[in-house]
Amino acid sequence: MVTLSDLKISEVKLGEEQTGKWGMVIDQDICTGCQACVAACAMENNITFVGEEDSGYGRSMHWIRIERFWEGEYPEVKMTANQPMLCQQCGHATCEPVCPAFATVHSQAEQLNLQVYNRCVGTRYCANNCPYQVRSFNWRDYQRPEPLPNQFNPDVTVRRMGVMEKCTFCIQRIHKAQDKAKSEGREVADGEFTTACAQACPANAITFGRVDDPESMVSQLAKRSHGVKHLEELGTLPNVTYFKGG
Amino acid sequence: MIKSIFDWLKQPLGLIAVGITVLTLFSIAAYGIYTTQQAPEQPIQFPHQTHVAFGIQCLYCHPGASKGPAAGLPSQAKCWACHNQIAKTETSALLAPLKEAVQSGTPIQWVPVAQVPDFVQFNHRAHIAAGKNCEDCHGDMSKVTIAQNPQVFNMGWCLNCHVESAGEDHEKLVKLSDCGTCHY
């Protein structure tokens, strides 16, 4: 019988060999910066509202955010394309090796970066080591006034104070689709489900799917020549491809 | 000051006082642990063993187990479908809350017994599909009145079974021992 100890870390392929499983393509040219993805993500994943004061301290919690940049000198200031930034689900993530509690680990099954809330002790080392700055920390137990608790997603843990959290690529939807497909004795079809942000995007700027399947929509889109992976030079092997100026 | 307290505690009366305090604290702790291991108070003292003895399948009252994440607790309408044809329902004091619930239309507030923490995402369907039987986790219901947990639902217990059922299948083991399978 294979035991847990047989699953050696050394078996994890590092460097350029590793291929992801789930990936995303974001077209910045059609993103309007409407923040629908940000709202949908917060609803889907039980993300709290930190309020004005904590937001002022830079403690706002988002798993996806729209970054804005400007070009040129005043008065010829030009805004560049909106840039939705979320966890890139790196194949070789910088957040993982620094966690002293092994709370952020790489999922061998789904090839995602996991955040195990019940293991997290809140050192915030992972967030400080993330080059994309996409992790957010629960500085308090934020109060949700009635009737807001009624809209909690029961498939997602409600995080407590002192716990780090980040985008999961809507792993609850992945599991739900896999469970449904398995009960019907088939494989999960491409486009059968998508993440909350991609579902909410009115411009269809976000596409989600299997990057290890060459026939999937994401793989087809990612082939376009002007695709960019952010901070790829750090060797993080991100699974999100951005298009700008195509 | 502290020395005089120690001196007082060293005399026979002081030793007895220390003994009584230690015993009291120990009893409170033991009672506290004991209460966590008891089945919770239910609105109706539901006799599982009677219903199992009649040959009613688990899935008749908890049909969600084979379809989705939650097995579900039956509403009074489901109970009433059988019980309104049973003469004993009218006379039994045990069944009075059920009659009351049906007449007033207020749902019975069953207290879930088998629960996992919020950070665990459990899906009944996958376990039933994998060939697990209800009694493998919930114990023999033909022997209990109100459901009791035969064991503590902790991660070691879950993982033991996951590793065992994976057997030699490495891909299955990866999936079943992945943190993200249950925690997200």
Image (cartoon, coloured by chain):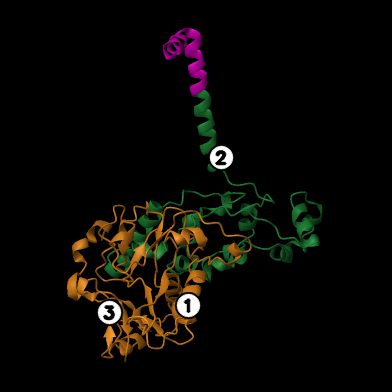
Q: Is residue A169 magenta?
A: no
- The amino acid marked with disc number 1 is Gln
Side of B171 relative to B52 (left or right): left
Instruction: Report if the CB atoms under discs 3 and 1 are less than 8 Å apart.
Output: no
Instruction: Answer whether residue A238 is visible to the viewer in this image.
Output: yes
- Rounded to the nearest whole Å, what is the CA distance between mark 2 and mark 3? 55 Å
Q: Which chain is green?
A: B
Circle 1 SS class: loop
- The amino acid marked with disc number 2 is Thr
What x and y, as percent, mark residue A12? 22, 67
Res. A35 mark: 1
Which residue is drawn at the image coordinates 78% and 55% (left, top)?
B88
Quarter containing the N terminus of chain B: top left
Viewer-nearest residue: A118 or B70? A118
Side of B48 relative to A188 (left or right): right
Circle 2 SS class: helix
Q: Chain of mark 3?
A: A
Query: Which residue matches tag 3?
Result: A229
Mark 2 surroundings within 10 Å by alpha-carbon count, few (fewer than 14), some (14 through 19), many (20 or more):
few
Asked if residue A42 is positioned above or below residue B37 in the image, the reply reads below
Viewer-nearest residue: A142 or B34? A142
Q: Quadrant of residue A228?
A: bottom left
Mark 3 surroundings within 10 Å by alpha-carbon count, few (fewer than 14), some (14 through 19), many (20 or more):
some
- Rounded to the nearest whole Å, what is the CA distance between mark 3 and mark 1? 21 Å
Res. B35 mark: 2
Which residue is drawn at the image coordinates 35% and 64% (left, top)?
A114
Q: Which chain is orange?
A: A
